[in-house]
Amino acid sequence: MGDAPTEAEIVALSTDHMQAAARIRRVALWQRLPWLPDLHTPEEEEQYWRMHLLPNCTILGAAMGNQLVGVIAYGDDWIEQLYVLPDFQGLGIGALLLGCAMEEMDEIRLWTFQRNIGARAFYERHGFVAEEETDGADNEEKEPDVLYHWRRFPEPTLGLQPPH
């Protein structure tokens, strides 16, 4: 990467970024999970980000230089989307984005596909626990998936009683 910055900058995304966000999802998903059916056009995916995710979620991006390389959409105790371009995976960008959501929510749920071994290992490294597995009948890809859950531990207290 030469003189490219080595640390990602987290930025709030707006409507102007939805095409790039949808593209990151598309590239990351299809390169890592090529067996999934391609059910939507790039334009339909952009509309989903613009019309559904943007009004209902916090959407953050990870930028390196002037390139958006990762994206997360979250809210109401759910991570709806978290993707990093394949060439930028393994650099801590996903952890940085996930950390933003974990700072804001006391518990988080998310779905990932059972066969997405990389994502499963990533979430488990960050304290998520598999809570339920399905046969995929309820998702549009009809791909078996798994529900992950993370909960913030309460702050420890010393439990000391004041002197009488």
Image (cartoon, helix red, strand yellow):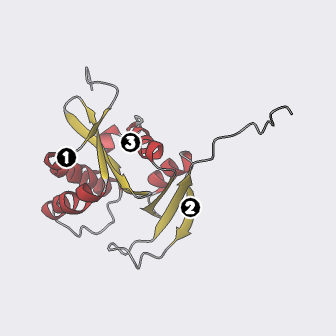
Q: Image point 23% across, 70% down: which residue? A: 39
Label 1 – label 2 distance at C-alpha: 32 Å
Marks 1 & 3, CB-CB < 8 Å contact: no
| Marked residue nearer the N-terminal end (1 or 3) | 1
Q: Image point 40% across, 71% down: which residue? A: 143
Indicate the position of residue 27 as horizontal and vertical percent values. 25, 52
Which amino acid is tagged 2?
Ala
Label 3: how many Cα within 10 Å (few below 14, some 14–19, many 20+): many
Q: Which residue is mark 3?
A: 97
Q: Which residue is mark 1?
A: 14
Q: Which residue is mark 2?
A: 130
Indicate the position of residue 58 as horizontal and vertical percent values. 31, 50
> In the rendered view, would you say 114 is above or below 58?
below
Q: Image point 19% across, 46% down: which residue? A: 14
Q: Secondary structure at mark 3?
A: helix
Label 2 – label 3 distance at C-alpha: 20 Å
Quarter of the image with the N terminus is: top left
Q: Nearer the viewer, residue 163 or 145?
A: 163
Which amino acid is tagged 3?
Leu
Q: Nearer the viewer, residue 32 or 5?
A: 5
